[in-house]
Amino acid sequence: MKKVYIAALACSLSLFASAQETFDALQMSQTELRGTARFQSMAGAFGALGGDISTLNQNPAGIGVYRSSDANVTLSLDFNDSKTPNQSISKTKFNAQSVGYVGAIQLNNDVMPNLNVGFSYSRQMDYDRRYKGCNNGAPSSITNYTAAYTGEWTPTEISQRSDYNPYYKTNAPWASILSYNSYLINYQNKKWQGLYGEGTSAYNEFEVEQKGHKDEYSVNLGGNIINKVYWGIGVGIVDLNYDSYQYYGETLQKAYIANYLTHDVEIGSADFGFENILHTVGTGYNFKLGLIVKPVNELRFGFAFHTPTYFDMKDSFKSNATFAMSSSSYNTYHGTNETGEKGYYDEMRYTLKTPWRFMGSVAAVIAKSAILSFDYEYVDAQSMRICDSRGDEFISTTNNIKNSTKASHIFRAGAEYRLTPNWSIRAGYSLQKSPVVEAIVNNMQNVVTVNTNPTYEFDNDIQYITAGIGYHINSFYFDLAYVHKERKSQYNAFAPIVYSEGIEPNVFSEVKDNNHRASLTIGFRF
């Protein structure tokens, strides 16, 4: 029987009840292509253009381009299809995507002709999706993974009794406590082992449902200098609300299970599953600075940088495990265990600093009837930080972020052509490179998770293909946009374990999201 009990990994792989880790921070730091219909239809390549309310969240210098006041609202309808190799689930959602106002103040000054102020609400990220899948013939078990990081803790220390609650009486990993009290890990010869060994066959299934959003409320001030240099500054207040339900279960034949009376290991069958429920809320703030330089009327350059969003966060979480075991020496025994005090939610407060962002843009205006625009954005994922509620940094988490992430590069290209004085057509493309290092993508590196949930997911490259039309007459305008988002993610039920003799493999699955969005913006300039 192959036993996996690597005490040396216990410190680096412990799943304590604590703040979020690397891939949680990445998920909370995500943004996506959203905003006005004109902004979306050109794939967000507006960093050197301005004159659109969505630039308040991108390059705040765009507010300086305005010569008149503007107010608009954007509505959208999303159709999302999430696929694993053997399952597909579709969801449809309608929402108000953005609302904004820019007030232009004419200064009648040759040096600074106008000073503008803007207010906007915009949805930065929609987390809603659901996917599930299964796998017959898994190469390992989550129980082996749990046994590996349980380390030097003894059964006495993590055993639940009427007068002793190990969740609060020890610093042992909560997942170890839950697993041991559900007969999912065994203690033999002073070493921990899982249920999967030589000759074991495994079937697993998983389900993930995510809900929530990240919204930003922006206040911006900007203007222009001799109609050549446009500047802007902005403050953003960000509201985050995220819910996650995750189920992971396994059915093992010829499993190495412990007799619940003698605790001796026997060959039998095991059927078990974990449910993990997480609710996260956060409020944060950020600052943005930007410039647009127009050396000639046909050419513009844009520059912007965003500080991190500094979040105050709160997680509420709980888990439970159900199990059924049987062997030739006894009938099936089964049960349910819950974390904490009778399965009540536990809470954790902490702070999160999202990545720094830097943007460079160039745009050309051709014959006063066409626009070509290109943006590049650098996202410093390694600058993310997670701290406790007093602001003290979790050093081990910082090291994990540095070892697991790299800078993300976002490329955007957009075009607009004026068919008539009233009608315009638009198109765009955007590519967002993954911030995850190749060793993680290829399942060659240990990954740390927290609380009782060893599951983690991350995005590979994301691309957008966009198109749209616009119409304006007098002060009124409306824009329509179509956005196709293609995202490939990797779901990992638990991490691989890398040790000197080799790698204990993990269970993972590709998830493909195809999102189709239609957006309508109605606006009025005055």
Image (tube, helix red, strand yellow):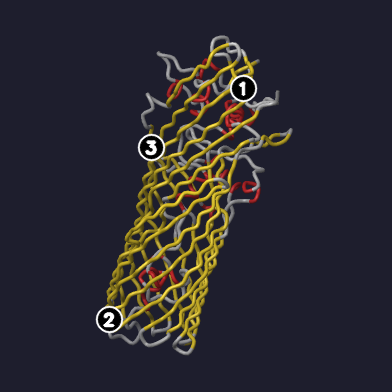
The answer to whether 378 is drawn above or below residue 24 in the figure is: below
Judging depth in this view, the residue of 189 and 354 nearest the camera is 189
**Based on the displayed image, in which of its 4 quarters is residue 269 positioned?**
top right
Q: Which mark is residue 418?
A: none
**Based on the displayed image, in which of its 4 quarters is residue 38 positioned?**
bottom left
Residue placed under numbered mark 3 in the picture: 316
Extreme-bottom residue of the structure: 367
Identified at 64% across, 27% down, the residue is: 196
Q: Is residue 56 left or right of residue 69?
A: right
- Name the amino acid, label 2: Ser
**Residue 50 location (% of width, % of height):** 41, 75
Residue placed under numbered mark 2 in the picture: 475
What's the CA distance linking mark 2 and mark 3? 48 Å
The answer to whether 252 is drawn above or below residue 517 in the figure is: above
Residue placed under numbered mark 1 in the picture: 192
**Which numbered mark, 2 or 3, is in the foreground of this view?**
2
